[in-house]
Amino acid sequence: MEKSKKNLNLYLNGIVSVMIAVVTGFYIANGNQPYYRDLNANVLTVLIVTFAISLIPFGLKKLSRVSTRTLLGNLEKILLPTLIIYSGVQFLAMRVESFGYIFASNLEAGNEDAMRAGTQAILLLALFALAWLVSLVSSFVSEEP
């Protein structure tokens, strides 16, 4: 594989790993907001597993068996975008009702904690989507193990 494509693949994999770490941090922060206080252990577990899977491409070259490298590389290409979008959809399901209260009704009018938590949740959803898109691009650009 040409050097520029290897570099692009390395950078994209690094960006995906960093983005998943950032998303996980934002998720923990949003789940501990005074308005929400509802950290979901399942979503957090999926995000941690997703981060671990995102590190697979960095260790593939150290494996001696080509069949193992190919299997792990292909599993990573499938699992990473799938788990990112799964955890993002689970997070969205947790926040849909509160978005209605915060942004579309008078029930939370003037509640700064609610507005801050809702805005942070929207930012987090955008980060989930961006991490998912970058992981998809990374899957298509990735090198053969």
Image (cartoon, helix red, strand yellow):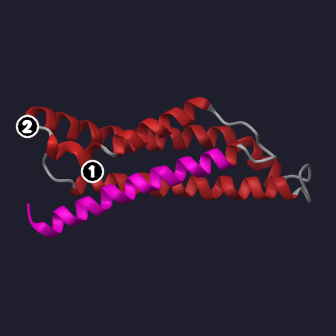
Single out the residue that lies furthest toward the bottom.
4
Task: Tell me the SS state at disc 2.
Answer: helix
Q: For label 1, count other residues whose C-alpha is less than 10 Å away and answer few (under 14), some (14-19) or many (20+).
A: many
Confirm or deny contact between disc 1 and disc 2 (CB under 8 A): no
**Between 17 and 119, which is closer to the camera in this rendering?**
17
Q: Which residues are magenta?
A: 1-29
Residue at the spot 8% in from the left edge and 34% down from the top edge: 65
Which residue position holds label 2?
66
Q: Report the magenta stretch's main SS.
A: helix
Residue at the image position 67 percent from the left and 38 percent from the top: 94
Front residue of 27 and 91: 27
Q: Nearer the viewer's eye, disc 1 or disc 2?
A: 2
Residue 24 is one of the magenta-drawn residues: yes
Residue 107 among magenta residues: no
The residue indicated by pointer 1 is 139
Residue 92 x %, y % = 62, 43
Asked where in the image residue 32 lies, by quadrant, the reply is top right
Q: Is residue 6 left or right of residue 75?
A: left
For image coordinates 75% across by 48% down, the residue present is 33
Instruction: Please tell me in which quadrant of the rendered image residue 118 appears.
Output: bottom right
Residue projecting furthest to the top: 42
Residue 63 spot, x, y in % from top left: 14, 38
Residue 89, image x, y percentages: 55, 41
Using the rendered view, name the quadrant where residue 15 is placed: bottom left
Quarter occupied by the C terminus: top left
Mark 1 to mark 2 CA distance (whole Å)? 19 Å
In the image, 90: left or right of 82? right
Amino acid tagged 2? Val
Tell me the amino acid under the disc marked 1: Ser
Depicted 110 relative to depicted 36: above or below:
below
Specify which label sits upstream in the sequence, 1 or 2: 2
Q: Is residue 47 left or right of residue 65?
A: right
